[in-house]
Amino acid sequence: MASLDQPTALERFINGILPENPVYRQLLGMCPTLAVTNSMQAAMTMAGATAFVLISANTITSLIRNVLKPHLRILVFTLTIATFVTIADRFLAAYMYEMSKQLGPYVPLIIVNCVIVGRCEVCGSRQPVHVAFSDGVGQSIGFALALASIASVRELLGSGTWFGLPVLPASWPAWVIMLLPPGAFLTLGALMGVVNWYQARRAATAK
Amino acid sequence: MIRYLAQAWLVILLGLCFGAALAGMQMLVADRIAENKLNETLAQIPVLVPGAERGEPATVGERTVYRALQGDRIVGWVVPAGGLGFGDRIELLVGLDAQAATLTGLYVLEQKETPGLGNKIGDETWRDQFQGKRLGTPLTVVKRDPAPDSAEIRAITGATISSQAVCTIVNQALTDEFRAALAAAAQE
């Protein structure tokens, strides 16, 4: 079909990081973005688990794209994603037990992360394996960067630490609200504004 | 049948492959997960039973329980209990005194209840109301302040089913018969 105007593997990779960042540009995957970004450790574990699921599901979808019946595709995507999420969930429970308890139901909830099913639909089911793989990696890096940016702000202001290490002086009055849900919305809103302002400025200078 | 298979063969095949992959994963890590849970259980025993210093597994009435020990004296029991919650299975640890007549603590080992509502069953403030409840009358969930010295537990706002599930699991695990067996085992 129109394979000529499809982005190449490199374009897919770069697009995922900033131009089509899953959180800041596509506004997908808001549930983990808001829920687990109160500490860097939790956010990075979530980013890692999501990356594993996203890259695996995108690659598998691409491998079977030629035998995939269009009306059964969502069923197959969900089946694939659910399998990898369960593997990630069991892995965390076995090797990172504390973190697994802290993340609780948010690990199984990766199944309904729209970023993943979105990439399977947009890229995995249409393009060859190497493109789907680099798309998965690019989007995963973009997602991880977005989570890291939000979690850094929240953990720093909320507990004065970064990755659990003390950064701000002990006299810092920890803003507990940053660790609670309102902090997630405030941070996401502020950072989204910065990204939009930057994009607008870049578009203006390009003219 | 042929038409059905022509449409669905990929889904069936993937289902089988993924099922096998999950079974393999389970075989690989099941022991480790069980070990993690055992360690967490043993670490919780001094919290669940006042005066306990350590715990050791025991079998009472064909169920695995934990003796809470102070030196070599049994000061209480910790009973694992599980059942269906609102989301997935809830697994609890229930602390009892040596006669298995009073609850001394409750701990949530595993739950996947709704974040922000049902997952409050893990909060200490909610779990604390189980402390000191006399066993014998089944625990009931109420939506007001529980009457003093009763078997009433205050429901979590917006999570009545999760609250009810916890009480049901405790009630079902601690039958009179089983508590009598625990009390007898403590005498030995």
Image (cartoon, rainbow, N blue to C red):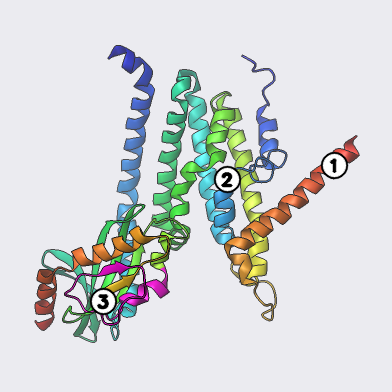
Write the residue at 55% across / 56% down: A35
Q: In which quarter of the view is residue B47 placed?
A: bottom left
Q: Quick check: is B142 in the magenta stretch?
A: yes
Q: Characterize the magenta stretch by its predominant secondary structure.
A: loop
Disc count in the image? 3
Quadrant of the image containing the C terminus of chain B? bottom left
For badge 3, the amino acid type reads Gly
Which residue is identified by label 2?
A: A29
Question: Do the residues marked 2 and 3 share a common chain?
Answer: no
Which residue is identified by label 1?
A: A202
Question: Do the residues marked 1 and 2 share a common chain?
Answer: yes
Give me the chain letter of mark 3: B
Whether residue A162 appears in this view of the structure is no
Residue A129 percent location from the top left of the image: 55, 27
Q: Is residue A21 left or right of residue B52?
A: right
Q: Secondary structure at mark 1?
A: helix
Residue A185 percent location from the top left of the image: 64, 57
